Amino acid sequence: MNGFKCGMLFRAFEGQLMLSIHAPSKLTEERAVFLPMIEKDGRHSGSKQPR
C-alpha cells in the first residue's frame, strides 16, 4: 500500500483506534482503507490486518 499521502486517526464505535487512508493514490482506483492501530505508552503503531 504505497502511494497514499495522508490519513486520519479516529476511534471506531467499539473504541478501537483506527487509521483511515485512501489508497492507491490514483483517482479512479482510490478506495478507503481502515487499519487498526495499537496504542502503548502514549505511542501509536499499526497492526498488519486492514479492515
Image (cartoon, rainbow, N blue to C red):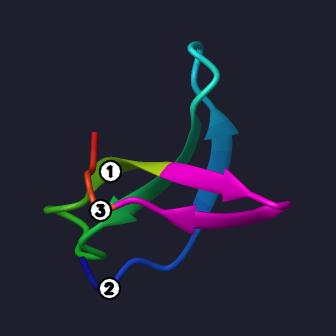
22 horizontally vs 23: left or right: right
Q: Is residue 20 above or below residue 2?
A: above
Specify start and end residues of the magenta stretch as a single range.
37-47
| Quarter in which the C terminus is drawn | top left
Image point (24%, 76%), residue name = 1
User: Left or right: 18 with respect to 26?
Assistant: right
Disc on the earlier residue, 3 or 1: 1
Left or right, 7 with reference to 34: right
Main SS category, magenta section = strand
Which dot, 3 or 1, sits closer to the camera? 3
> Hey, which quadrant is residue 2 in on the image?
bottom left
Q: Secondary structure at mark 1?
A: strand
Mark 3 packing: few (<14 Cα in 10 Å), some, or many (20+)?
Answer: few
Q: Residue 28, percent across and down?
A: 16, 62
Instruction: Give residue 48's mark.
Output: 3
Reading the chain from its start, which is encountered first: label 1 or label 2?
2
Answer few, some or many: residues within 10 Å of disc 2's Cα (few below 14, many 20 plus, some between 14 and 19): few
Report helix, strand or loop for mark 2. Answer: loop
Residue 44 in picture, x, y percent from top left:
68, 64
Q: Amino acid at mark 2?
A: Gly
Q: Type of residue at label 1?
A: Val
**SS assignment at label 3:** loop
Q: Residues within 10 Å of mark 1 (few under 14, many from 20)?
A: some
Question: Mark 2 or mark 3, which has the lower sequence index?
Answer: 2
The magenta stretch spans residue 44: yes
Q: Amino acid at mark 3?
A: Lys
Q: Nearer the viewer, residue 43 or 5?
A: 43
Q: What label sits on residue 3 in the rendered view? A: 2
